[in-house]
Amino acid sequence: MENEIAPIVERELRASPDSIEQIEEGLLHETYEISCDGEEYVLQFSSEGDEGEADALRRGLNCYVMLQDTEVPVPAIVTEEIRAFDRGWYSLVEKLPGKTGKLDISPRKVRNAARYLAKIHDVRSFETSGWVRFEDREPSVRPFQDGSLRRWILRTVEETSTTLGDGGMESAGSALERVFEREGAALPDEFAPVFCHNDFTPDNVLFENKEVVGILDFDRAHASHAQRDLVKAANGFWMHDPGEEWNVRADFYEGYREVNELDSSFEANEPLYRGETLAWTVAGLLELNELSAYEKEFYTEKILEAIDRIKDVSR
């Protein structure tokens, strides 16, 4: 692969790379860190023939372009559009300082990250929910094929329930399906859609001295309910250290509230979104064969606890 990367770097930066290092873990795209003339860059590829992957790469790069002059810290752009090469597409951006919070979260980091999620939600509002796309640099929305966020969630809950059951987490899958058959109509269907990251986890937030210095990977961005994106993100931060004695989700919500108000509907919506997004994330890990027998048992218990909270709210 280095034989393919070097000509790309020379074409884009007009200099030969000093070093090329592949980043292996947790990324949608094949990713490399490049050192060139004393500066560092990130080069990402999508596979030839994979239109979904190319769309995600394009969406992520366009989101970086859109966010350049906002309070959201994103990489500076080298290639303003994804470029074609022999076996697919690529994008090149400058590497930001800092380290991800993957293996090191704390109450201060959690609250700071949540403040930036609130700022992301303030960037843009939309008339309908769906997948963010760009036409001549302007963001627009391709509506969910199901017609609304609620119907999209209910369909994905069915798929998640099946995945959990097939993966050895039958009790969680069955309970999830039952509770959303009964309570799914309570999912919000009227809200003002905003720009949502949709994958806001410690893997995608860079910290330096516990302060946020970068936010990465907007490949899955969509127009959606801010409350759902918030709850999904809080789940994501909690899952990076679920054994912590401090309340990760409560700290995340507190940080978010320092920037954006949460109206009274959040109390009723939070349990629904927590159960749905936690189960969805766990199902994704199951599909990647990334859960041990112990983790399956642990997350079965946590999904059932989340479902019980839905029952409590509905009584």
Image (cartoon, grey):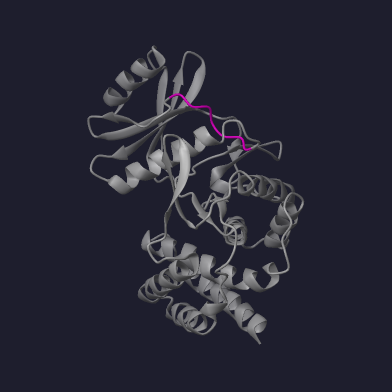
Considering only vertical position in the picture, is 112 above or below 208?
Answer: below
Residue 268, how many percent across, how many down? 66, 74
Residue furthest bottom as drawn:
315
Q: Which residue is drawn at 66% across and 87% down?
A: 315
Which stretch did the figure color magenta? 72-78
Q: Residue at x 62, y 61 (%)?
A: 227
Q: Which residue is drawn at 57% across and 31% down?
A: 68
Of 44 and 257, nearer the camera is 257
Magenta-span inclusion, residue 40: no
Horizontal side of residue 31 vs 115, given as left or right: left
> Image quadrant for the N terminus?
top left
Residue 5, how many percent across, how many down? 32, 25
Horizontal side of residue 99 vs 282, given as left or right: right
Residue 123, how many percent across, how many down? 61, 43
Considering only vertical position in the picture, is 15 above or below 67?
Answer: above
Of 257 and 27, nearer the camera is 257
Residue 107 in view: yes
Considering only vertical position in the picture, is 178 above or below 143?
Answer: below
Considering only vertical position in the picture, is 96 above or below 278?
Answer: above
Q: How many labels does the image show?
A: 0
Horizontal side of residue 193 vs 81, given as left or right: right
Q: Main secondary structure of the magenta part?
A: loop
Residue 200 in view: no
Residue 137, how many percent across, how many down? 45, 35
Quadrant position of residue 147: bottom left
Quadrant position of residue 13: top left
Q: Residue at x 42, y 61 (%)?
A: 284
Horizontal side of residue 70 vs 10, given as left or right: right
Of 210 and 44, nearer the camera is 44
